[in-house]
Amino acid sequence: MNTVISTTAAARVVPPGAGLVARTSHAAFPDIEVKFTGDGFGFSMIDYAVPPRFAPPPNLHRHTRENAVIYVLEGELHYWFEHDDAVAGPGTALLLPAGAWFRWANETDRPARLLALFAPGGFEQFFVDLFAAIEADGADDAAIGRHIGPMRERYGDEAYPH
């Protein structure tokens, strides 16, 4: 068992909007605020504002390096797994162990919001890097297509084999 020792014993408080904010000017993309990075604590946490009708690429995928816990704060999100699916509303928690196949979407006309914890930390940087690359490249659908595949590979986000 690995124990992660923090380099500081000081508490941290991250008020709303004071984390590392990642967004693009693409109208359909979410806003993400990284509350805690994986630096020295063994986990990371992001606050994810999901626009109405937002869906990442519509195929099952899995994280190969980290476990994730999703906690729905507002709205409703649909999750699909390898053999079933679930609709998650406020107060619902989902555990996505490394290697578990899933996909998700906000199928409603209302925004949703979730907290995502990743352990070990590191996957939060996927969003920061992806959004920066998309924005630098024009923040249009073509830019998304050019950058999503290489970023998924870089961060161990694997597509379901068909």
Image (cartoon, grey):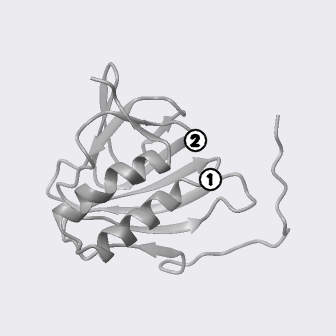
Q: Which residue is mark 2?
A: 66
Q: Residue at x 82, y 73 (%)?
A: 10
Q: CA distance from mark 2 to mark 1?
A: 7 Å
Point out residue 36 in the picture as x, y percentages from the top left corner: 61, 65
Q: Residue at x 53, y 43 (%)?
A: 68
- Viewer-nearest residue: 99 or 10: 99
Q: Residue at x 19, y 59 (%)?
A: 52
Q: Is residue 151 above or below residue 35?
A: above
Q: Which residue is mark 1?
A: 121
Q: Are marks 2 and 1 in contact (CB under 8 Å)?
A: yes
Point out residue 86 in the picture as x, y percentages from the top left corner: 31, 32
Marks counted in the figure total 2
Point out residue 14 in the picture as x, y percentages from the top left corner: 60, 75
Crowding near the residue tagged with mark 2, few <14, some 14–19, many ≥20 C-alpha atoms within 10 Å: many
The quarter of the picture where the N terminus appears is top right
Badge 2 marks a residue whose secondary structure is loop
Q: Is residue 89 above or below residue 10?
A: above
Determine which quarter of the picture holds residue 6: bottom right
The quarter of the picture where the C terminus appears is top left
Point out residue 142 in the picture as x, y percentages from the top left corner: 18, 62
Q: Residue furthest left?
A: 109
Residue type highlighted by circle 1: Gly
Badge 1 marks a residue whose secondary structure is loop
Residue type highlighted by circle 2: Glu
